[in-house]
Amino acid sequence: MTLTAPSIDPADVARFETLGDEWWRERGPMRQLHKLNPVRIAFIRDHMLEHFGAPPAGTLPLAGRRMLDIGCGGGILSEPLARLGAEMTGIDPGPGNVDIARLHGERHGLMIDYRATSAEAIAADGASFDAVLAMEVVEHVADVPGFVATATQLVAPGGLLFMATLNRTLKSMALAIVAAEYVLRWVPPGTHKWSQFVQPGELKRPLSRAGFRVIEATGVTYSPLADRWNKNADMDVNYMIVARRRDNAT
């Protein structure tokens, strides 16, 4: 049974729920997400350390930092951040995804609070976190402004919000859909809808209204020769944003 909330697209949730153990097969349908992970982790870790300061010597980089991973899927991002010391909560509207994430984390001795719930439900409980992550999630939600507004509510004063998504450009149509889904078969056809891709301004405006200041917006591109993803200035297809909540933001 799939959970419902204003931002949830049931068709997208159902599509990812079919993955099962494939979430963790590094050469399976989530192969490129696994390859993208080092770039995402470095981006999050470096901004967390710069913003909050380095922990005491001998402790893990993210020790004691409470972090929420919205749309955690099978836990591909939550697990490495937990290994860096973060107190992770991972939420996903697909109960099957949460079951896979929880089982995989337990097998590897990680204590991660996985929940089959929505960002809206967590916000309604009044929870807040040092950092909230919405990585490769925004392009799958039904109401982007509403989702961003909800995500900002979950960030504690002075905390950070990280987002990664796909830009709505002709270049992204060619590379992220035609090439990635139908030519290279990186992901199953129909995984993405170009109309749901989000231009940077469509994130920055609601962030500003919520009292957030964008610290960095950066592109992420794939190098076929090196077979890896790199952070750079090209935001035409994939990009990441980190924004800081002002201490008095409400």
Image (cartoon, rainbow, N blue to C red):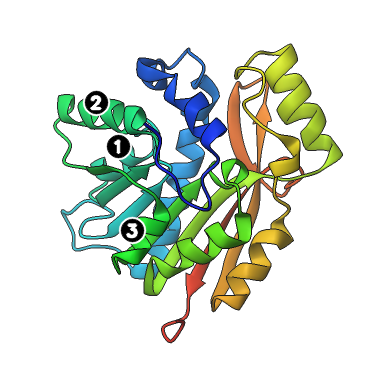
Position of 11 relative to 63 (above/below): above
Q: Which of marks 2 and 3 is in front?
A: 3
Asked if residue 3 lies left or right of residue 115, the reply is right
Residue 60 in percent (x, y) is at 22, 51
Q: Which of 182 and 52 is in front in this view?
A: 182
Mark 2–mark 3 distance (CA, rounded to whole Å): 23 Å
Position of 119 relative to 50 (above/below): above
Residue 176 in percent (x, y) is at 71, 29
Position of 210 relative to 93 (above/below): below
Q: Tell me the number on the disc at residue 104.
A: 2
Question: Measuring 59% from the left and 69% from the top, which residue is drawn there?
Answer: 207
Amino acid type at mark 2: His
**Which callout, 2 or 3, points at the residue further toward the start of the chain?**
2
Check contact, mark 2 vs mark 1: CB within 8 A: yes
Spot the residue most to the bottom: 248
Q: Which of marks 2 and 1 is in front?
A: 2
Position of 111 relative to 223 (above/below): below
Question: Residue under circle 3?
Answer: 122
Q: In which quarter of the image is the C terminus?
A: bottom left
Q: Dot 3: few (<14), some (14–19), or many (≥20) neighbours within 10 Å?
A: some
Question: Residue under circle 1?
Answer: 79
Asked if residue 44 lies left or right of residue 186, the reply is left
Residue 1 in percent (x, y) is at 36, 31
